[in-house]
Image (cartoon, rainbow, N blue to C red):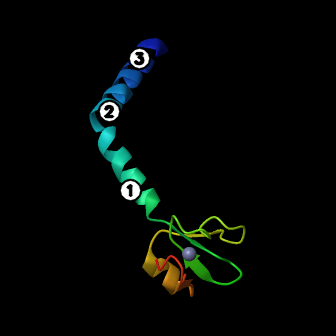
C-alpha cells in the first residue's frame, strides 16, 4: 500500500525538481554569494574574494551590508564591502 504513494511522491518531487530546479538554484547561488564575514575580534567585515574573508576569526556571517553595520561591524578597508 505504501509503495504507490512513495512513487507518486518521488515523481512529484522529480517533476518539481525539473520544473523549478534551475530558478531557485540560481537564486540560491546568488543569495549565498552575498554574504559577508565579520571578524569577531576586530569587528571588521569582509566581502567574498577578500583575502581575509575566510580568516580564522572571520566567523560572524552577515547576509547583508546593513546587517553587518547594525551589528556594530565596519567595512574592511581592503575589500570595501
Ligand atoms: Zn576585506
C-alpha span from label 2 to label 3: 14 Å
Count of labels in the image: 3
Task: Specify which label sits upstream in the sequence, 2 or 1.
Answer: 2
Give the vertical position of 12 relative to 52 (above or below): above
Give the percent coordinates (x, y) of residue 3. 46, 13
Whichever of labels 2 and 3 marks the residue nearer the N terminus, that label is 3
Category of crowding for the residue at label 2, using alpha-carbon neighbours closer than 10 angstroms: few (below 14), some (14–19), many (at least 20): few
Q: In the rendered image, which residue does mark 3 sit on?
A: 7
Above or below, comparing residue 62 to residue 1 in the picture: below
Residue 46 image position (x, y, % from top left): 55, 74
Mark 3: few/some/many CA within 10 Å (<14, 14-19, 20+): few
Between tags 2 and 3, which lies in front? 2
Q: Position of residue 6 (x, y in %)?
A: 44, 19
> What kind of element bears circle 3?
helix
Q: Position of residue 71 (x, y in %)?
A: 55, 83
Q: Is residue 76 above or below residue 58?
A: below
Q: Is mark 3 within 8 Å of ligand 1?
A: no
Quarter of the rendered structure image containing ligand 1:
bottom right
Q: Which mark is residue 30?
A: 1
Which residue occupies the foreground of this view, 42 or 72?
42
Left or right: residue 72 compared with residue 13: right
| In front: label 1 or label 3 | 1
**Residue 16 circle label:** 2
Q: Counting residues from the N terminus, which is met first, the one under dot 1 or under dot 3?
A: 3
SS under mark 1: helix
Residue at horizontal 29 percent and vertical 38 percent from the top: 20
The residue that appears at 56% across and 77% down in the rendered structure is: 45
Residue at image location 41% in from the left, 17% down from the top: 7
- Secondary-structure class at tag 2: helix
* Front in this rendered view, residue 48 or 31: 48
Amino acid at each position: 500500500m505504501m509503495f504507490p504513494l512513495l512513487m507518486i511522491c518521488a515523481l512529484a518531487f522529480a517533476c518539481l525538481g525539473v520544473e523549478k530546479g534551475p530558478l531557485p538554484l540560481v537564486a540560491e547561488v546568488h543569495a549565498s554569494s552575498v554574504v559577508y564575514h565579520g571578524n569577531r575580534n576586530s569587528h571588521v567585515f569582509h566581502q567574498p574574494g577578500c583575502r581575509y574573508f575566510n580568516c580564522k576569526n572571520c566567523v560572524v556571517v552577515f547576509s547583508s551590508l546593513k546587517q553587518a553595520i547594525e551589528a556594530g561591524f565596519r567595512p574592511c578597508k581592503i575589500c570595501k564591502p
